[in-house]
Image (spheres, rainbow, N blue to C red):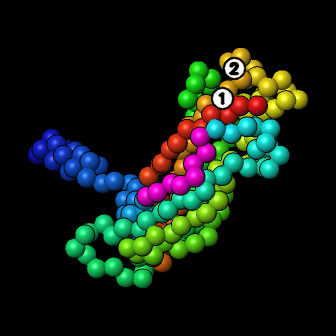
């Protein structure tokens, strides 16, 4: 009897463990999905010395769309998403391994349910990234060469995500979107 109880208990525990997703409350998103639906004015190349002088690299325009998960469902203003922040991380698209530190910034705006939020001239890199390795290697005063690879060009992948909260309080975020930029002195 005790052995049967233990087997039944383990089966029940396994079912519960497999059936539960610990992030459900964070990924439910209040019935909506945020999507980075359009990029305009993506930088494809940037001179580090010129960018360091202005203090940033930016994207001309990014559109974030708020989509109702259930195509037959009704929306309400409680499904509007207040955009709170965004994050840009970097990976190397060349043979190097050093990357700039991530950029995390606050952002204010609302993506209405079934609508769009457009951000213009969004910084995707600032002096925190431009004046630290590996990009600082490309500054004229530092020799203009990536010390790790010996190249005068650094190719970086930019990975962006936006974070927000519905008016009803559910956290929501976009899937990552990426693009690549070549940096030179």
Q: Are the residues tagged 2 and 1 within 8 Å (C-beta)?
A: yes
Picture coordinates of residue 166, whole percent (x, y): 46, 73
- Residue placed under numbered mark 2 in the picture: 151
Picture coordinates of residue 35, whole percent (x, y): 42, 59
Q: Position of residue 93 (x, y in %)?
A: 55, 29
Q: What secondary structure is marked by label 2?
A: loop
Count of labels in the image: 2
Q: Secondary structure at mark 1?
A: strand
Q: Identify the residue at image location x=58%, y=72%.
A: 109
Relative vertical location of residue 22 with respect to residue 34 in this rendering, above or below: above
- Camera-nearest residue between 37 and 128: 37
Residue 154 vs 37, above or below: the answer is above
What residue sits right under mark 1 in the picture?
Answer: 154
The residue stretch that appears in magenta: 37-44
Q: Which mark is residue 132?
A: none
The question of residue 47 being in magenta is answered with no
- Answer left or right for 92 relative to 13: right
Quadrant into which the C terminus falls = top right
């Amino acid at each position: 009897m005790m052995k049967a109880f233990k087997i039944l208990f383990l089966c029940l525990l396994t079912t519960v463990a497999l059936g539960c997703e610990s992030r459900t409350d964070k990924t439910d998103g209040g019935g909506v999905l945020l999507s980075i639906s359009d990029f305009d004015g993506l930088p494809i190349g940037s001179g580090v010395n010129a960018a360091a002088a202005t203090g940033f690299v930016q994207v001309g325009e990014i559109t974030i769309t708020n989509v109702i998960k259930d195509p037959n469902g009704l929306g309400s203003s409680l499904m509007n998403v207040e955009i709170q922040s965004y994050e840009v991380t970097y990976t190397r698209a060349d043979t190097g391994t050093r990357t700039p530190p991530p950029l995390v910034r606050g952002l204010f705006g609302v993506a209405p349910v079934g609508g769009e939020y457009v951000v213009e001239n969004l910084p995707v890199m600032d002096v925190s990234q431009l004046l630290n390795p590996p990009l600082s290697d490309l500054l004229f005063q530092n020799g203009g060469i990536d010390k790790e690879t010996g190249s005068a060009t650094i190719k970086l992948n930019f990975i962006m995500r936006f974070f927000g909260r519905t008016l009803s309080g559910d956290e929501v975020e976009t899937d990552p979107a990426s693009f690549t930029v070549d940096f030179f002195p």
